[in-house]
DNA sequence: GGCTTATCCTGGGCGC
DNA sequence: TGCGCCCAGGATAAGC
């Protein structure tokens, strides 16, 4: 499940090989994967553009093209962007093929087909075509502080785990890193977001920063479907403390890791290490 | 307005 | 072996 570290890993991988490459041909194999414009137009309009830069905002990849155009990608649950030789074998999950003039190919694979691509025409902007970009919250690795987090969560009665997943508050955190960050900060996931003490908020911000940076260093987590742009699995999941470990002993206190549902999402925690503060 | 729940979607795991 | 059911989850719409 691509979250900020996985998207950042993909971004860095693409940045090594895409700039300067020219788009020769585009094949849309599943029209549903194209959010804007119509898939036929999407394919036609991309041809001839040169890749210039690859940026990230939250979990969105924002790829800058020549003549002021752009290509945005959201991997959602199972999307992958891979650079492969043009003639390499097609898997059944390939949704979009962006064929480059250098005989390589930027391939969008997406098993669960929630991922989306947008073409941004010259003269427009990512924010105009994807309005939700305007609503994204703070980047967790851009100087977020405990005080700022408390302000974001002020008055909120929802669980802190749910608030962490709200991209309008903090952009980039998903289910895995929300659970891991709350464990590292010793905060129970059901703690009301607005009730966090300054000490807890400071711990949580430090934990988020440490865990996201560690995950980026390890190439992200490959708990289910994620691979980086070279098709390589991340290694973060090998060091997970709670996510996906229901029923197993806590690495810190040996008590059993529990799981509950919050806002429809599986939430993993250690009932001993993470104190309740409702 | 704030929050929760349902929906989209499909492969994998599990039980029978 | 094959079938059916459940689960996973990011974003968004709908409902409370």
Image: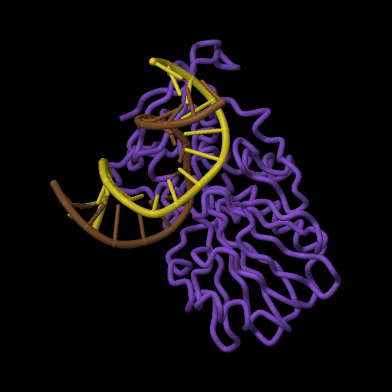
Chain colours: A purple, B yellow, C brown
Q: Residue at x 32, y 37 (%)?
A: A192
Q: Residue at x 59, y 53 (%)?
A: A110
Q: Is residue A190 left or right of residue A221?
A: left
Q: Is residue A90 above or below residue A29?
A: above
Instruction: Estimate the x, y position of residue A40 in percent, counting from the top left.
Output: 56, 78
In the rendered image, which quarter is residue A158 located in? top left
Q: Quadrant of the N terminus of chain A?
A: top right
Of residues A9 and B8, the one drawn nearer to the viewer in this rendering: B8
Q: Is residue A228 above or below residue A27?
A: above
Q: Residue at x 46, y 25 (%)?
A: A269
View extreme (top): residue = A254
Of residues A228 and A101, the one drawn nearer to the viewer in this rendering: A101
Instruction: Estimate the x, y position of residue A163 in percent, counting from the top left.
Output: 39, 45
Q: Quadrant of the C terminus of chain A?
A: top left
View extreme (right): residue = A102
Q: Is residue A89 above or below residue A18?
A: above
Q: Residue at x 57, y 76 (%)?
A: A119
Q: Is residue A90 left or right of residue A204?
A: right
Q: Is residue A47 above or below residue A93?
A: below
Q: Is residue A188 left or right of residue A20?
A: left
In the rendered image, which quarter is residue A30 located in? bottom right
Instruction: Estimate the x, y position of residue A173 in percent, counting from the top left.
Output: 52, 47
């Amino acid at each position: 499940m691509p979250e900020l570290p996985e998207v950042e890993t993909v971004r860095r991988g693409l940045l090594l090989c895409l700039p300067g490459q020219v788009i020769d041909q585009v094949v849309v194999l599943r029209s549903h994967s194209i959010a804007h414009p119509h898939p036929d137009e999407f394919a036609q309009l991309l041809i001839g553009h040169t890749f210039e830069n690859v940026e990230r905002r939250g979990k969105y990849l924002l790829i800058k093209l020549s003549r002021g155009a752009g290509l945005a990608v959201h991997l959602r649950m199972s999307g992958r962007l891979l650079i492969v030789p043009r003639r390499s074998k097609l898997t059944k999950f390939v949704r979009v093929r962006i064929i480059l003039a250098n005989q390589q190919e930027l391939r969008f694979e997406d098993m669960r087909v929630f991922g989306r691509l947008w073409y941004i025409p010259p003269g427009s902007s990512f924010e105009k075509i994807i309005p939700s970009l305007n609503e994204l919250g703070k980047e967790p690795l851009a100087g977020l502080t405990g005080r700022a987090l408390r302000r974001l969560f002020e008055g909120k009665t929802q669980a802190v785990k749910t608030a962490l997943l709200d991209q309008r508050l903090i952009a980039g955190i998903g289910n895995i890193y929300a659970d891991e960050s709350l464990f590292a900060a010793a905060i129970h996931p059901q703690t009301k977001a607005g009730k966090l003490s300054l000490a807890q908020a400071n711990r949580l911000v430090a934990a988020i920063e440490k865990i996201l940076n560690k995950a980026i260093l390890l190439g992200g987590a490959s708990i289910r479907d994620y691979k980086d742009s070279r098709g390589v699995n991340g290694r973060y999941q090998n060091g997970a403390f709670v996510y996906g470990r229901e029923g197993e002993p806590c690495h810190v206190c040996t008590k059993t890791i529990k799981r509950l549902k919050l806002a429809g999402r599986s939430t993993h925690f250690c009932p001993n290490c993470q104190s309740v503060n409702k």
